[in-house]
């Protein structure tokens, strides 16, 4: 029995890559592709077990209740979601299994775990800056991965990222607060994705860095997540749980 997969965002670069990955996987069958021109999304999802969605927040928000109503599991890589949209996804996860991750890369998933470990081990007295770079066409900033990295550090410190994040510096900024987590964003050219978390202490620095050299890593991770949700119980999962096979 093969996994029946639908892919959203069929006209985009990531959507096309996901379609190719599903078609190349011997254990998967592509049963539908969705785009903004799809006339009846509900009908298109009729045969799908899983929808992989790397689109825009407004599109994802529309797909979530349709998938919940039909019992179609979801793998969501959309970034830039609002708190309200994330809350709606969490509510849908009481009916269907959903993996939500701003970056489906296995390497990024491991990096997030390393960030929490490093933050706890280093303790107080270390300044943290998150630097990310992407291609000129990316529409949100900071990237979802950068925010996830900031969340990992804040969580390990027992903080809320919203309380300590600094997204821009200009002019007379004053001294840096001890618990601040800074973000810097670069946009240009065809950079696929680069993320660095800098821990700056007195007399030494540590960097945890992830570089993407091809978008295929995201498609591979998404398929791994699709295989996971195909047999998972309803719930709200992340990529760490996909890799470990653990419950929420």
Image (cartoon, rainbow, N blue to C red):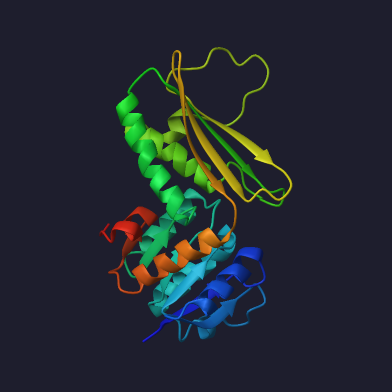
With 117 as the anchor, is 182 left or right in this view? right
Q: x, y (%) of residue 86? A: 45, 54
- Could you say which quadrant of the image residue 7 lies in? bottom right
Residue at x-position 47% and y-position 73%: 51
Is residue 183 at least partly visible in the picture? yes
Residue at x-position 42% and y-position 22%: 179
With 113 as the anchor, is 20 left or right in this view? right
Residue at x-position 66% and y-position 50%: 139
In the foreground, 41 or 170? 170
Q: Quadrant of the N terminus?
A: bottom left
Position above or below: 167 against 234? above
Is residue 157 at least partly visible in the picture? no
With 117 as the anchor, is 70 left or right in this view? right
Number of disc labels: 0
Position above or below: 151 against 1? above
Q: x, y (%) of residue 56? A: 59, 60
In the foreground, 160 or 226? 226
Q: x, y (%) of residue 20? A: 58, 74
Position above or below: 182 against 94? above
Q: x, y (%) of residue 118? A: 35, 32
Q: Quadrant of the C terminus?
A: bottom left
Residue at x-position 45% and y-position 70%: 65
- Could you say which quadrant of the image residue 106 lies in? bottom left
């Amino acid at each position: 029995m093969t996994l029946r997969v639908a892919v959203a965002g069929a006209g985009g670069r990531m959507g096309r890559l996901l379609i190719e990955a599903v078609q190349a996987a011997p254990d998967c069958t592509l049963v539908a592709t969705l785009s903004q021109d799809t006339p009846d999304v509900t009908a298109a999802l009729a045969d799908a077990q899983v929808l992989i969605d790397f689109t825009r927040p407004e599109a994802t928000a529309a797909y979530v209740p349709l998938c919940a109503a039909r019992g179609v599991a979801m793998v969501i890589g959309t970034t830039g979601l609002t708190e309200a949209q994330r809350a709606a996804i969490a509510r849908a996860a009481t009916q269907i299994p959903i993996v939500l991750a701003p970056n489906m890369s296995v390497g990024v998933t491991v990096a997030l775990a390393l960030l929490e470990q490093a933050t706890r081990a280093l303790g107080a007295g270390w300044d943290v800056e998150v630097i990310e770079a992407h291609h000129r066409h990316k529409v949100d900033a900071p990237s979802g991965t950068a925010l996830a990295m900031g969340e990992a550090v804040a969580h390990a410190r027992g903080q809320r990222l919203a309380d300590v994040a600094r997204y821009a510096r200009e002019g007379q900024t004053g001294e840096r607060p001890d618990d601040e987590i800074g973000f810097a964003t670069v946009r240009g050219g065809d950079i696929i994705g680069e993320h660095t978390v800098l821990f700056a202490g007195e007399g030494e620095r540590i960097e945890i860095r992830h570089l993407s050299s091809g978008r295929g890593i995201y498609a591979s991770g998404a398929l791994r997540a699709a295989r996971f949700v195909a047999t998972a119980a309803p719930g709200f999962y992340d990529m760490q749980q996909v890799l470990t096979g653990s419950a929420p």
